């Protein structure tokens, strides 16, 4: 009986997590501070065509704008904006982001969870969205 309850609980949690990836999620608008941070990071850069995957670069830096907007800085001239599918609660509060991806790339649909730094408890679940490159214009 106990094993059945455990499996049922796991299945219910999995269903809730997957529901966040169906595209029906409407993210909260950015706060004034978050919008200013995003604008500052992308200032002077031009958006390009979205891509589904980017290479994992050792020098890639992750910047959390909100619980559903991330920036991957590859260089001073190239930043990728990613709008998560779902919301990884706690990201903007400093929780740890755990990405489950396979291979040498980060791709749309790679499953992501967040965990509280102090307790290790899972605080959110989402998936990576498309990556929009922002590049400095050619001189």
Image: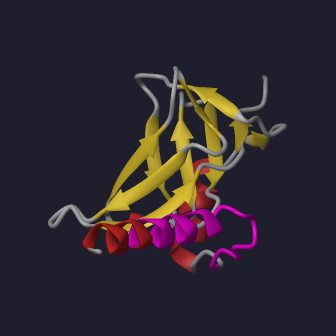
Q: Is residue 12 above or below residue 40?
A: below
> At x 79% / y 43%, what residue is drawn?
47
Q: Residue furthest right?
A: 49
On-image quarter of the N terminus? bottom left
Q: Position of residue 106 (x, y in %)?
A: 56, 33
Q: Nearer the viewer, residue 132 or 134?
A: 132
Q: Is residue 110 in the magenta section? A: no
**Left or right for 128, reference 119:** right
Q: Is residue 26 in the magenta section? A: yes
Q: Nearer the viewer, residue 115 or 29?
A: 115
> At x 26% / y 65%, what residue is drawn?
116
Does any portion of residue 14 appear in the rendered image?
A: yes
Q: Residue furthest front?
A: 1
> At x 44% / y 44%, what residue is drawn?
99
Q: Position of residue 34 (x, y in %)?
A: 54, 69
Q: Quadrant of residue 51?
A: top right
On-image quarter of the C terminus? top right
> At x 64% / y 47%, what residue is drawn?
81
Q: Position of residue 93 (x, y in %)?
A: 35, 70
Q: Position of residue 123 (x, y in %)?
A: 36, 69
Bounds of the magenta segment: 9-28
Q: Is residue 43 above or below residue 87?
A: above
Q: Nearer the viewer, residue 2 or 100?
A: 2
Does any portion of residue 89 appear in the rendered image?
A: no
Q: Quadrant of residue 110?
A: top right
């Amino acid at each position: 009986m106990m094993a059945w309850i455990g499996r049922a609980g796991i299945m219910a949690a999995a269903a809730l997590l997957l529901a966040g990836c169906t595209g029906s999620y409407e993210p909260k608008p950015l706060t004034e501070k978050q919008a200013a941070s995003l604008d500052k990071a992308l200032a002077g850069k031009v958006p390009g065509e979205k891509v589904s995957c980017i290479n994992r670069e050792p020098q890639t830096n992750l910047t959390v704008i909100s619980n559903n907007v991330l920036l991957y800085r590859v260089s001073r001239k190239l930043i990728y904006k990613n709008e998560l599918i779902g919301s990884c609660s706690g990201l903007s509060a400093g929780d740890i982001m755990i990405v489950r991806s396979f291979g040498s790339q980060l791709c749309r649909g790679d499953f992501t969870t967040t965990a509280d730094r102090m307790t290790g408890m899972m605080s959110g679940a989402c998936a990576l969205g498309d990556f929009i490159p922002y590049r400095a214009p050619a001189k």
